[in-house]
Amino acid sequence: MGTKGHQIVALIAEAHFDAGTREKLKAILPKNSTLAKASVWPDEVRKALPQMNPLHYVDVPNGSSSYDQERDCPQRNCIVEAISWYLTVLKSNDSPLAEKQLARNYLVHLVGDLHQPLHVGFLDDVGGTKTNVTFEGRVQNLHALWDEGILATEKGSAQAMAKQIDDECSADDRTARQTGTPRSGPTSRWH
Protein backbone atom coordinates (compact mmCIF):
# COMPACT_ATOMS: atom_id res chain seq x y z
CA MET A 1 0.00 0.00 0.00
CA GLY A 2 1.36 3.40 -0.90
CA THR A 3 1.62 6.60 1.12
CA LYS A 4 -1.89 7.86 0.42
CA GLY A 5 -3.45 4.48 1.16
CA HIS A 6 -1.64 4.17 4.49
CA GLN A 7 -2.66 7.70 5.45
CA ILE A 8 -6.31 6.94 4.61
CA VAL A 9 -6.28 3.79 6.76
CA ALA A 10 -4.70 5.70 9.68
CA LEU A 11 -7.15 8.61 9.41
CA ILE A 12 -10.18 6.31 9.39
CA ALA A 13 -8.82 4.33 12.35
CA GLU A 14 -8.05 7.49 14.30
CA ALA A 15 -11.56 8.83 13.69
CA HIS A 16 -12.95 5.86 15.61
CA PHE A 17 -10.61 5.82 18.61
CA ASP A 18 -12.26 6.22 21.98
CA ALA A 19 -11.00 8.90 24.39
CA GLY A 20 -8.71 6.47 26.24
CA THR A 21 -7.05 5.28 23.04
CA ARG A 22 -6.61 8.89 21.89
CA GLU A 23 -4.83 9.78 25.12
CA LYS A 24 -2.54 6.75 24.90
CA LEU A 25 -1.70 7.59 21.30
CA LYS A 26 -1.04 11.23 22.15
CA ALA A 27 1.41 10.11 24.84
CA ILE A 28 3.56 8.20 22.33
CA LEU A 29 3.31 10.50 19.30
CA PRO A 30 6.12 13.01 18.92
CA LYS A 31 5.02 16.65 19.12
CA ASN A 32 3.35 17.86 15.89
CA SER A 33 3.07 14.33 14.51
CA THR A 34 0.03 12.32 13.46
CA LEU A 35 -0.90 8.69 13.11
CA ALA A 36 -1.11 9.27 9.34
CA LYS A 37 2.55 10.39 9.33
CA ALA A 38 3.53 7.42 11.49
CA SER A 39 1.79 5.02 9.10
CA VAL A 40 4.20 5.71 6.23
CA TRP A 41 7.44 5.62 8.24
CA PRO A 42 8.07 1.85 7.81
CA ASP A 43 8.15 2.28 4.02
CA GLU A 44 10.34 5.38 4.29
CA VAL A 45 13.03 3.44 6.19
CA ARG A 46 12.71 0.15 4.32
CA LYS A 47 16.02 0.45 2.48
CA ALA A 48 17.85 1.37 5.68
CA LEU A 49 16.26 -1.52 7.61
CA PRO A 50 16.08 -4.41 5.11
CA GLN A 51 15.84 -6.93 7.95
CA MET A 52 12.31 -5.59 8.60
CA ASN A 53 11.08 -6.26 5.03
CA PRO A 54 9.61 -9.73 5.80
CA LEU A 55 7.30 -8.08 8.32
CA HIS A 56 5.32 -6.54 5.45
CA TYR A 57 3.93 -9.85 4.11
CA VAL A 58 3.40 -13.57 4.59
CA ASP A 59 3.47 -16.32 1.99
CA VAL A 60 1.45 -19.53 2.23
CA PRO A 61 1.72 -22.67 0.08
CA ASN A 62 -0.29 -22.80 -3.17
CA GLY A 63 -3.79 -24.07 -2.54
CA SER A 64 -3.72 -23.21 1.14
CA SER A 65 -6.81 -21.46 2.44
CA SER A 66 -5.48 -20.48 5.86
CA TYR A 67 -2.44 -19.26 7.75
CA ASP A 68 -0.48 -21.71 9.88
CA GLN A 69 2.24 -20.10 12.02
CA GLU A 70 4.43 -23.21 12.23
CA ARG A 71 4.30 -23.74 8.47
CA ASP A 72 4.15 -20.17 7.15
CA CYS A 73 6.11 -18.14 9.69
CA PRO A 74 8.16 -20.46 11.92
CA GLN A 75 10.62 -17.70 12.85
CA ARG A 76 7.72 -15.31 13.61
CA ASN A 77 9.17 -12.88 11.05
CA CYS A 78 6.07 -12.04 9.02
CA ILE A 79 3.15 -9.62 9.01
CA VAL A 80 0.77 -11.77 11.09
CA GLU A 81 3.25 -12.35 13.91
CA ALA A 82 4.55 -8.76 13.78
CA ILE A 83 1.05 -7.37 14.32
CA SER A 84 0.59 -9.62 17.34
CA TRP A 85 4.01 -8.67 18.74
CA TYR A 86 3.52 -4.93 18.25
CA LEU A 87 0.10 -5.07 19.93
CA THR A 88 1.75 -6.73 22.93
CA VAL A 89 4.41 -4.01 23.04
CA LEU A 90 1.80 -1.24 22.93
CA LYS A 91 -0.30 -2.84 25.67
CA SER A 92 2.67 -3.37 28.00
CA ASN A 93 3.27 -0.89 30.79
CA ASP A 94 6.91 -1.99 30.80
CA SER A 95 7.74 -1.14 27.16
CA PRO A 96 10.05 1.86 26.77
CA LEU A 97 8.66 4.87 24.88
CA ALA A 98 10.94 4.34 21.85
CA GLU A 99 9.78 0.72 21.56
CA LYS A 100 6.13 1.82 21.77
CA GLN A 101 6.72 4.42 19.05
CA LEU A 102 8.28 1.83 16.76
CA ALA A 103 5.41 -0.56 17.51
CA ARG A 104 2.83 2.16 16.78
CA ASN A 105 4.42 2.99 13.42
CA TYR A 106 4.62 -0.63 12.35
CA LEU A 107 1.21 -1.62 13.68
CA VAL A 108 -0.71 1.07 11.80
CA HIS A 109 1.38 0.41 8.70
CA LEU A 110 1.07 -3.38 8.75
CA VAL A 111 -2.69 -3.33 9.32
CA GLY A 112 -2.90 -1.30 6.12
CA ASP A 113 -0.58 -3.73 4.31
CA LEU A 114 -2.57 -6.72 5.53
CA HIS A 115 -5.67 -5.35 3.81
CA GLN A 116 -3.91 -4.98 0.46
CA PRO A 117 -4.56 -8.39 -1.10
CA LEU A 118 -1.01 -9.04 -2.30
CA HIS A 119 0.68 -8.85 1.12
CA VAL A 120 -0.72 -12.29 1.94
CA GLY A 121 -0.24 -14.66 -0.96
CA PHE A 122 1.10 -17.88 -2.33
CA LEU A 123 4.81 -18.64 -2.26
CA ASP A 124 5.27 -18.49 -6.03
CA ASP A 125 3.30 -15.33 -6.84
CA VAL A 126 5.92 -13.04 -5.22
CA GLY A 127 3.22 -10.64 -4.08
CA GLY A 128 2.15 -9.92 -7.65
CA THR A 129 5.49 -8.30 -8.48
CA LYS A 130 6.12 -10.64 -11.44
CA THR A 131 2.69 -10.09 -13.03
CA ASN A 132 2.51 -7.09 -15.36
CA VAL A 133 -0.82 -5.43 -16.05
CA THR A 134 -1.97 -2.40 -17.98
CA PHE A 135 -4.24 0.03 -16.15
CA GLU A 136 -5.24 3.44 -17.46
CA GLY A 137 -2.70 2.97 -20.27
CA ARG A 138 0.20 2.37 -17.89
CA VAL A 139 2.08 -0.92 -17.60
CA GLN A 140 2.99 -1.82 -14.04
CA ASN A 141 3.17 -4.92 -11.90
CA LEU A 142 0.03 -6.07 -10.11
CA HIS A 143 1.45 -5.23 -6.68
CA ALA A 144 2.22 -1.65 -7.71
CA LEU A 145 -1.27 -1.30 -9.16
CA TRP A 146 -2.83 -2.33 -5.84
CA ASP A 147 -0.35 -0.30 -3.79
CA GLU A 148 -0.70 3.02 -5.60
CA GLY A 149 -1.96 2.74 -9.18
CA ILE A 150 -5.69 2.43 -8.49
CA LEU A 151 -5.69 5.06 -5.75
CA ALA A 152 -3.73 7.47 -7.95
CA THR A 153 -6.77 7.73 -10.23
CA GLU A 154 -8.86 9.13 -7.38
CA LYS A 155 -8.80 12.87 -6.85
CA GLY A 156 -8.58 14.43 -3.42
CA SER A 157 -6.36 14.44 -0.39
CA ALA A 158 -5.96 11.51 1.97
CA GLN A 159 -8.08 13.44 4.49
CA ALA A 160 -10.92 14.03 2.03
CA MET A 161 -10.86 10.44 0.80
CA ALA A 162 -10.79 9.04 4.35
CA LYS A 163 -13.82 11.15 5.26
CA GLN A 164 -15.70 10.09 2.13
CA ILE A 165 -14.96 6.39 2.65
CA ASP A 166 -15.85 6.60 6.33
CA ASP A 167 -19.07 8.50 5.61
CA GLU A 168 -20.12 5.84 3.08
CA CYS A 169 -19.62 3.01 5.58
CA SER A 170 -22.85 2.08 7.37
CA ALA A 171 -22.90 1.65 11.14
CA ASP A 172 -23.67 -2.07 10.73
CA ASP A 173 -20.80 -2.56 8.29
CA ARG A 174 -18.42 -0.66 10.59
CA THR A 175 -19.42 -2.83 13.56
CA ALA A 176 -18.94 -5.98 11.50
CA ARG A 177 -15.46 -4.85 10.43
CA GLN A 178 -14.45 -3.90 13.95
CA THR A 179 -15.49 -7.31 15.28
CA GLY A 180 -13.84 -9.17 12.40
CA THR A 181 -17.11 -10.40 10.92
CA PRO A 182 -16.93 -10.75 7.13
CA ARG A 183 -19.44 -8.62 5.31
CA SER A 184 -21.93 -10.17 2.99
CA GLY A 185 -21.28 -7.80 0.10
CA PRO A 186 -19.93 -4.40 -0.87
CA THR A 187 -21.45 -1.36 0.75
CA SER A 188 -19.89 1.33 -1.41
CA ARG A 189 -17.83 1.95 -4.51
CA TRP A 190 -14.62 1.60 -2.47
CA HIS A 191 -14.80 -2.16 -2.18
Image: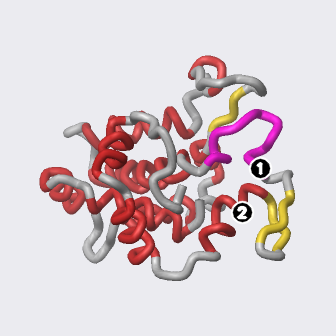
Q: Residues within 10 Å of mark 1 (few under 14, many from 20)?
A: many
Q: Which residue is mark 1?
A: 128
> Residue 7's image quarter?
bottom left
Closer to the camera in the image, 146 or 30: 146
Q: Main secondary structure of the magenta part?
A: helix
Residue at 85% x, 69% y: name it: 139
Q: Is 73 within the magenta?
A: no
> Residue sitting at 59 percent across and 25 percent down?
67
Residue 163, horizontal then vertical, whole percent: 36, 70
Q: Is residue 191 above or below residue 138?
A: above
- Quick one: quadrant of the C terminus? bottom right
Q: Position of residue 156 (x, y in %)?
A: 49, 81
Q: Quick one: which residue is furthest to the top in this view?
A: 70
Q: Residues within 10 Å of mark 2 (few under 14, many from 20)?
A: many
Quick check: can you spot residue 51?
Answer: no
Q: Which residue is mark 2?
A: 145
Q: Is residue 55 left or right of residue 22?
A: right
**Magenta region, residue range:** 117-128
